[in-house]
Amino acid sequence: MNYFLSDVIAGTKDAGFKARFDIEKILEANKLKKITNDAKNINRSNSILNHIKIRNGWIVKLSNLKKGDNLVIQFPLAYRTIFLRNILKMLKSKGVNIILLI
């Protein structure tokens, strides 16, 4: 199955997020399934609590991916986490193919 990670921040109007949004529309048009982080009360600060909330949200959402699945990630993520490397390692160990769009 083909998926993409969505972390476009609603209401953001700069050109960088417009490009991210456009890419998401292309991915959806090509039948990739959107995965969003449902973590609550996330803001763009660098507090360790935010990093943990983001990590936990992604782990829950990505836990259903299995060997042979493809995951497209627009990089860098809008909601950064210091735990991203661990999340990617977990997915690779499960056999998920990760594609980064830079």
Image (spheres, rainbow, N blue to C red):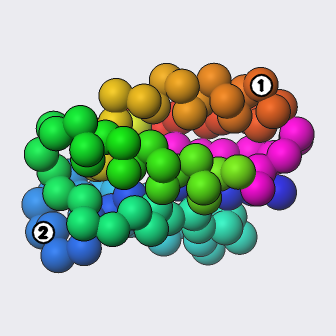
Toward the viewer: 43 or 4?
A: 43
Toward the viewer: 95 or 22?
A: 95
Q: Which mark is residue 27?
A: none
Which residue is the extreme one toward the front? 49
What is the total number of numbered labels drawn onto the structure image?
2
Determine the image quadrant of residue 64: bottom right
Q: Residue at x 30, y 57 (%)?
A: 19
Where does residue 2 sit, x and y in percent of width and height? 75, 56
Q: Which residue is mark 2?
A: 13
Toward the viewer: 55 or 75?
A: 55
Check if residue 22 falls in the magenta segment.
no
Q: Can you see residue 68?
A: yes
Task: Write the start and end of the magenta stretch as one range.
Answer: 64-74
Where does residue 33 sit, x and y in percent of width and height? 67, 67
Q: Which residue is mark 1?
A: 93
Q: Secondary structure at mark 1?
A: helix
Where does residue 51 sit, x and y in percent of width and height? 31, 40
The amino acid at mark 1 is: Ser
CB atoms of marks 2 and 1 within 8 Å: no
Q: Nearer the viewer, mark 2 or mark 1?
A: 1
Q: Tell me which numbered mark, 2 or 1, is placed earlier along the sequence.
A: 2
Q: Residue at x 68, y 64 (%)?
A: 32
Q: Residues within 10 Å of mark 1 (few under 14, many from 20)?
A: few
Give the alpha-carbon distance from disc 2 to disc 1, as whole Å: 37 Å
Quick check: 37 left or right of 31? left
